[in-house]
Image: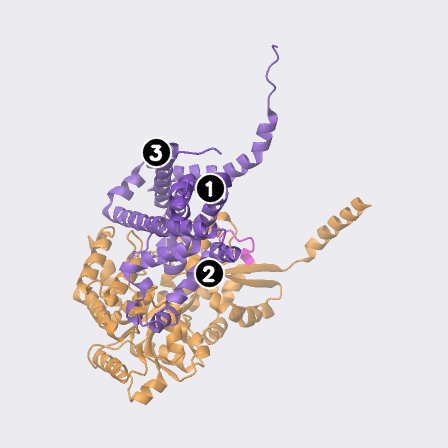
Amino acid sequence: MKKTYLTALLTSTLLAGPTLAETTLTIESWRNDDLTIWQDQIIPAFEAQHPDIKVVFSPSAPAEYNAVLNSKLAAGSAGDLITCRPFDASLQLYSGGHLADLSGLASMANFSSVAKSAWQTDDGAATFCVPMASVIHGFIYNKDAFDALGITVPETEADFFAALDKIKADGSYIPMAMGTNDQWEAATMGYNNIGPNYWKGEEGRLALIAGTQKLTDADWVAPYATLAKWKDYLGDGFEAQTYPDSQNLFTLGRAAIYPAGSWEISGFNAQAGFAMGAFAPPVQAAGDTCYISDHTDIAIGMNAKSPNAEAAKVFLEWVGTPEFATMYANALPGFFSLNSTPVEMQDPLAQEFVSWRGKCQSTIRSTYQILSRGTPNLENETWNASANVIKGTETPEAAGARLQEGLASWYAPQK
Amino acid sequence: MASRKPVRWHIAVFLAPAVLVYTAIMIIPLFGTLNFSLFNKGDDGVVFVGLANFATLFGDPRWSGAFWNALGNNAWFFLIHMLVQNPIGIALAAILSTPRLRMAAFYRTAIFIPTILSFVIVGFVWKLILSPIWGIAPGMLDAVGLKSLFAPWLGKEEYALTALALVSVWQFVGIPMMLIYAALLSIPDEVLEAAEMDGITGASQFWKIKLPLILPSIGIISILTFVGNFNAFDLIYVAQGALAGPDFSTDILGTFLYRTFFGFQLQLGDPYMGSAIAGAMFGIILLGVCVYLFGIQTRLRRYQF
C-alpha cells in the first residue's frame, strides 16, 4: 500500500517535470542595497517582455562578494549572471574561464570604448561584461546649513577651506563628515575624489601606468598634503568613525559637507530631512580645468558554465538597451548609465552630478587599472596611506615614497 | 591455552564514526593546505616550488614585515588574555565557590552569557559602546568626571589592539571561570576539612590548598587560550575589517591569512601564499602545544584522592 503510494508520488514528479518549461536565471551581485529595486522594478519589466524567463536577484555583502563569488565559481554553484567588478577582478574571472566572451552581443554597440574598457582584455579583443553604470565623486552639502551661514558653493580650494573655517567657527555643524576607521573612505572619497584635479585626470593616470610619472611627483603627493589639512574639520573621534557613522552624521543634519560618491544619492534622499546640493572637487585656482572621477563601477556578465546560456544572453541584450539604462539610472540615481544614448534623469542631485561631465574632464580612479595587479596592492596601500595622512601619523611625502617603493617593487615600467 | 586473543572489533567500530568525520573535515584539509603551500603559479599553470613560498614569507621584507607584525600583535593579544582573562576567571571561580555567596547561580549565568553570543554581535555592540559619536562610553566617563580619559580607542594605533583584546576577554572570561569552578567543586570536602583542622582558612586556604589542586586545570585553560588566540580572526574582522586598521595595528595571523588567501577589494586572493601562512600558523600552534605538553604538563604534580 505504502509502496504504491510512493510509486505514484515518483511518477507524478516525473510527469510534472517537462511542463516546467520556463528558465530561472540567478544574478550574483554585491549590491544588496538594490534588492528591492531589482525585485520591484527591473525584474518585473524584463519578465513582462519575456514570460518564459524568471530572474532571481541574489546579492551578497559587498566586502565578501569577491571571495564568495570566487568560491562559488570554483565549486560550480554560482548563478547564471555575474555582476562584474571593474578591471582585474573580472579579468581574472574571464581568463580563468568563468566569464563568457560577450563581444558578439548586438547591444555592445550601444557602449563607447571607454565604457567597455573596464571589462575588456588588455588588448581590447574580448569584452566579457555589459557595462551598467559609473559613479561620480564630489561633495554633497547641506543646503540649509550653507544658506544659514551664508556660504556659497566653493569653486576653488581656497573657497573650500574658507567655507570649512566658517562652519567650524559657527560651531553648530561638524564641517565635514568623514572617518578613517574603514580606511576606504579616506582613499576613495578623499584621495581619488580631489586627486584628479592635481594629476590632470587621464593625463596623469596614464602617465603613471606608462611609468613617466611617479607617485613621489608633486602632482601625486599634493592631494595628500590637502587631505592632511582635512583633519581639523572632521568630527571628534574621527579615527574611530566608520562609514555608516559618517553617512548618519550627515543625514541627521549634524555635518555640513560630505565627501561623496554619487552612489549615496538614493540613500541620502530617503534619509535626509533637509535640502541637499552637490559640488565638484574644487580646483586650485579659479579658471583651472576641472577633473572628476567618473568611475566605471558596475557591469554584468555571464557565467561561462551556465546551463541557461541562451536565456542569459537574452537578459544581457536587454541590459544593453536604452530602456534598461533609463530604468536603472532613474531607479538608482547616482549610478549613471554608460549607454551612449543620453538618459533623462529626474533626480536634481543626480542631474547636478552628471552635469559635471559637460564641463569637466572625466577620469577613473587612479589605482584601478593594471596598477593593483601585484603585491603589495596599490589600492589597499592607498587606503592605508590616505587614512594615515589624514590622522597625521604619516607625512604626505613619506606616504608617496612608500607607495612608490611598493609599486616599483613589482611593476616594471616604474622600476 | 593456545587460544589466540580474539580480534577486538568493537574498538574499531566504536572509533570509526569519530575517526572518519575527523579525518574528512580536519586531517585531510590540514594536509591539503600544507601540500598547497608547496605550490605556486608558474608560467604554465601551477608548479611545485618546494619551500619557496616560505622563503618569500620570511625572506621578502614586505611579507616578513607583515608576518612579524601579525605575530607580534598576536602575542600581545595572547598576553592580555593570560594576564587579564585567566586571573579574573580564577578569581571569579574562587568567589563563586564560596558557600556563603548568595545568588551564585545568577552571577555564574550572567558572566557566562557573553561566551555564547556570536562574535558578530559582540564586535558590533562594543563598536557602538565605544563609538565617539553614538557610544555610551564617553557619556559614562563624563558622568564620573573622567571625560578627558576618553579617546576613540578603536581608531588609535596605540590602543586599538588592547581594546579589542579586552573585549575578547569580556566575552570569554566565562570559560576559565567555569572550568576552574568545576575543578574547585571537585576538591573533596575531607581535604578542606583537614586544612581547617590545621587552622588554614580563608585566603591562605585558597593559596595553599586549592590553587595547587587546580593547577592542571589552569594548564589546560592556558593551552586552550593559546590555541584560541592564535586561531583568532572573527572579532578583529568584525570590528576592524580585513585590513585590520588603524594601520595594521590590529592585524593578527588570522586576518593576515584571510586577506592573503581570499584577497581583499582589488587585491586578488593568493591561495598558495595563504596556505604558506596557514602552515606557519599551524607550526606556531603545534610548537606551543608541544612546549606545554612535554615541558609543562609532565612536570605538573597531580594528586589522587
Amino acid type of the residue tagged 3 in the rendering: Gly
A278 vs A291, nearest the viewer = A278
Which chain contains the residue that carries disc 2? B
Q: Which chain is purple?
A: B
Horizontal placement of B28 versus A360: left or right? right
**Residue B147 on the magenta span:** no
Q: Which chain is orange?
A: A
A226 vs A103, nearest the viewer = A226
Q: Quadrant of the N terminus of chain A?
A: top right
| Proximity of marks 3 and 1: CB atoms separated by less than 8 Å | no
Could you give the CA–CA distance between mark 3 and mark 1, rounded to whole angstroms?
30 Å
The segment highlighted magenta reads A299-310
Name the residue tied to disc 3. B295
Name the residue tied to disc 1. B192
The residue that appears at 45% across and 59% down in the rendered structure is B120
Q: In terms of secondary structure, where does tag 2 sit?
A: helix
Name the residue tied to disc 2. B121
The residue that appears at 20% across and 61% down in the rendered structure is A400
Q: Earlier in the sequence, mark 1 or mark 2?
A: 2
From the viewer's perspective, is the residue at label 3 or at label 1 nearer?
1
Co-location on one chain, circles 3 and 1: yes
Horizontal placement of B275 versus A194: left or right? right
